[in-house]
């Protein structure tokens, strides 16, 4: 019975994450690079169920290693990017700063293993706050999501996307302009996950 409950919870978590990704990131075009990998089904959604910090680190490292080992772009099984969803780690849920410390630890792992030129880590969080921005600014919603999420990107893919997109410096500005034009009710679903 417990196994069934966990599967249902995990399905809800995956569904909420995919809803956020499709209805927020893709529909609002917050990340113009995401459309291609989504269309090719090259995004991996992985959940770490544990509340244990060590297991969360192990899951993230396992996903980095998975991407490193499975790097044949011609393969039908190729995964370009992974979203590691960490819904149960209490410190991450309660503290955006603790989640950033977790990301910092993983950045250190990349450096120590000479992987910093291969992967980039991006944080998404229900209470994401950009430094220097007013706490009520809508700009934070470019990186807000239902659960703490570690996004592992291949730098090679980022470079290709940048080359094809051009002026990427304008993306954040355009995103903020989009969000500023939205009504408060447009944010209600996403706000329901923040504390």
Image: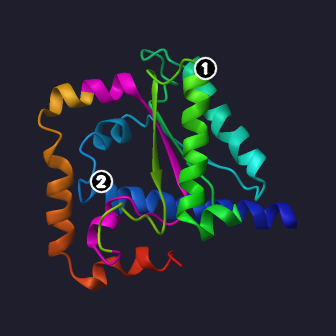
Callout 1: SS: loop
Q: Assess disc 1: are there few (<14), some (14-19) or many (≥20) residues with their C-alpha within 10 Å of its C-alpha.
A: few
User: For the view shown, which residue lies furthest in the bottom direction?
Assistant: 185
**C-alpha span from label 1 to label 2:** 32 Å
Side of 190 relative to 53 (left or right) = left
Q: Are marks 1 and 2 in contact (CB under 8 Å)?
A: no
Residue 27 location (% of width, % of height): 26, 58
Residue drawn at 28 percent across, 25 percent down: 159
Q: Assess disc 2: are there few (<14), some (14-19) or many (≥20) residues with their C-alpha within 10 Å of its C-alpha.
A: some
In terms of image quadrants, where is residue 122? top left
Asked whether 138 falls inside the magenta stretch, the response is: yes
Whether residue 188 is situated above or below residue 15 in the rendered picture: below
Whether residue 144 is situated above or below residue 184 in the rendered picture: above
Side of 69 relative to 6 (left or right) = left
Callout 2: SS: helix
Asked whether 61 falls inside the magenta stretch, the response is: no
> What span is colored magenta in the figure?
135-160
Residue drawn at 53 percent across, 53 percent down: 100
Write down the residue under mark 2. 26
Whether residue 126 is situated above or below residue 109 in the rendered picture: below
Whether residue 72 is situated above or below residue 165 in the rendered picture: above
Side of 146 relative to 36 (left or right) = right
Side of 137 relative to 53 (left or right) = left
Q: Nearer the viewer, mark 1 or mark 2?
A: 1
Q: Quadrant of the C terminus?
A: bottom right
Q: What number is the disc on residue 113?
A: 1
């Amino acid at each position: 019975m417990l196994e069934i409950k966990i599967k249902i919870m995990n399905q809800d978590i995956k569904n909420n994450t995919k809803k956020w990704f499709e209805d927020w990131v893709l529909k609002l075009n917050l990340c113009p690079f995401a459309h291609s990998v989504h269309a090719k089904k090259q995004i991996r959604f992985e959940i770490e169920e544990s509340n244990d910090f060590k297991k969360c680190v192990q899951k993230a490292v396992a996903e980095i290693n998975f991407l490193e080992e499975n790097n044949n772009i011609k393969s039908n099984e190729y995964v370009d990017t992974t979203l590691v969803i960490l819904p149960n780690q209490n410190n991450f849920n309660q503290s955006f700063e603790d989640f950033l410390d977790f990301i910092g630890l993983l950045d250190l792992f990349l450096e120590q293993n000479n992987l910093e030129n291969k992967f980039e880590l991006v944080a998404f969080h229900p209470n994401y706050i950009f430094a220097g921005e007013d706490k009520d600014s809508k700009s934070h919603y470019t990186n807000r999501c239902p659960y703490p999420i570690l996004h592992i990107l291949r730098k090679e893919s980022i470079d290709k996307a940048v080359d094809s997109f051009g002026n990427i410096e304008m993306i954040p500005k355009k995103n903020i302009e989009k969000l500023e034009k939205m009504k408060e009710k447009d944010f209600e679903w996403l706000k329901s996950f923040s504390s």
